[in-house]
Amino acid sequence: MDHARSLRQSLVPLVASVVGSILVTLCVLVLRNWGNLETLELVAYDWLLRSRAQAPATASRVAVITVTEKDIQEHDWPLKDAILARALEALERLKPRAIGLDIYRDIPVPPGSEELTRVFKNNPSIIVTMRMAEGSSATVAAPTALRNTPQVSFNDLLVDRDGIVRRGLLFLDDGKATVYSFALRLALVYLQAEGIVPQPDTVKPERLRLGSVTLSPLEGNDGSYIGADARGYQFLIDYADARRPLPSFDLASLLAGRINPDLLRDKIVIIGTKAESVPDIFHTPLSSESITGDRMTGMELHGMIAGQLLRHALDGASATKVLSETLETSWILFWGVLGSTVGIWSISPWRYWLLIVSGFVVITISAYGAFLLAWWVPLVPPAIAWLGSAAFATAYQSYQEKTQRTLLMQLFARHVSAEVADTIWQHREQFLDGQRPRPQQLTATVLFTDMVNFTTLAEKQDPLLLMAWLNEYMEAMAQQVTNHHGVIKQFIGDSIMAIFGVPVPRLSETEIAQDAVHAVSCALNMGETLTQLNRNWHAAGRPPAAMRIGVFTGPMIVGSLGSSQRLEYTVIGDAVNTASRLESFEKERFEPDVFQYPCRVLIGASTYHYVREYFVTEKLGEVILKGKNDIVTVYRVVSRNDPGAALCREEARDETSSVVPRNGDRA
């Protein structure tokens, strides 16, 4: 029964922490679903990309011909059709596999328009671009001669809300027909020579497969995205080739025939502009946050995307995949629940921060390791759930500890030493049952004190002076109890009840004996303290005092009584009554010397058994105390043990006579 209750009590903080952590995690999931974490998650995604990106081991399959500012100054802008025709013919002679023209030519720019049309029609490996209509942007049509042919593609790029390009497009539907992207058209022309054509996935036919790799379409809520525009067939750009720039040559070199054919043979070659006067610049995850950071031109982005498609088809490079919504939620929930353990296990600040940092490290390593395997696993939400749950669990544990400590200190703190208070707190699980001390049966030593003739003294003093005098006395006596590791149970007028051996149960005879020694030593110190007080009071013209002390060791029940608003630590047992009766035993016969021996200390046989080697005692006899039926052997404590007086002590014991009062003489 007690074990089951103890188990329930120990499970309550754990269950509360886990439930609270689940609620914290659910809040994180709600914030994520509302899009509040998207920016942070995309920043983490960019970091993962930058950490993974490295220069490819193989030579680039893509090169670019750039129209520079110098080329524009020489040939004007837009470039005449004749210049474009010359450039395309010069490029054909270098025998690339595919040529991409990333320059709009919806309107002829004579002279040379007919010549350019002839070049377009005679070389099916040339891919031209158009722009799809979007929002307020109008459509930019393809060259008239190539409309509705496989040589037409769109060069639109997806830009996220923060201005960064992270997604690529394979197809778009304008409502009339499906249009291929610029990079995909170029890649397919290249792959045709390898005998590779786009195929439907064997498991999900609606998905595109290049070689052995399937490109899964990205949905609006995949990865870190929340409500993103998911039109068309989208995929994640891996930027694996971004660390090494594409081979680049300017238009002037192409027209002058200064390019080594070996550098462009069997490659995809894209012609586009890099001139500042014709801006075509985009931020990427590898870009600096500053406006002057590393950015890519549109043709470079298309070239890099085409190179990625070739790696998928030819090298079997894995495409970046995302977890299902269920798995992402489970991953975040796992770290949220795991975070609750921090508050339970972190009993010290250094352990708390060690666990917090370790959790972040594991989450980061897990996300990074998964990213190396081409899986985009959330990083920010589990980290926030981990931290939030840990903070909640720690706050809950702190609240519980504060509540328990407040309760314990209300019961004990004012009446015990700092050492005992710390012991109580360290062992609180042993005796704290919910919001009150658990009743326990234990063996302890009880000490009762009472002033001699206090009523007579009180009648002769001014009430205010009496209270000050009594407080000085109580303060001094209470300090002795504290110094000797006792717990003051209560003050009753001029009396004090103290207990040695509570609230933490003593588990051995040695510990019980030590409590008894502490109690008797405390009693003697009280007498010595009162001697000094009496001398001070006498010098100040105030009355001296005397006191009686009874000490008894035995079994008792300890616990708390009262309501949840007002509790009192209580001790119940025959040992308590016996100690009280020892204090008042034959009190009329006690004639103190207030300046030499103002205190009488009586102990029972059970206490004597534990302390006889440490103190000089006198056996007063075997008596029946008031209100008791059993015979109690009473001893008076004379002083602390002096090894040199051992012989005298034994002789004194032999000469002591037993006093057994008749029924009419019972105390």
Image (cartoon, rainbow, N blue to C red):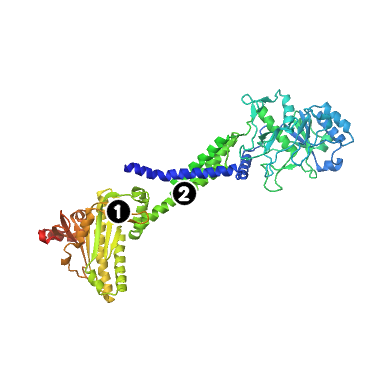
Kindly identify the amino acid type of the residue bearing the numbered disc 2.
Thr
> Position of 102 compared to 591: left or right?
right
Q: Quadrant of residue 482?
A: bottom left
Q: Quadrant of residue 162?
A: top right
Instruction: Tell which of 48 and 464 is nearer to you.
Output: 464
Mark 1 → mark 2, Cα distance in angstroms:
30 Å
Instruction: Tell which of 462 and 478 is nearer to you.
Output: 462
> Position of 466 compared to 129: left or right?
left
Q: Position of residue 196 (x, y in %)?
A: 70, 24
Q: Position of residue 83 (x, y in %)?
A: 86, 35
Quadrant of the image for the C terminus? Answer: bottom left
Q: Residues within 10 Å of mark 1 (few under 14, many from 20)?
A: many
| Residue at 17% over, 57% down | 627
Residue pointed to by mark 1: 502
Q: Which mark is residue 394?
A: 2
Instruction: Tell which of 196 and 139 is nearer to you.
Output: 139
Q: Earlier in the sequence, mark 1 or mark 2?
A: 2
413 above or below 350? below
For numbered disc 2, what is the local secondary structure? helix
Kindly identify the amino acid type of the residue bearing the numbered disc 1.
Val
| Residue at 29% over, 58% down | 489
Quadrant of the image for the N terminus? Answer: top left
Q: Is residue 256 visible?
A: no
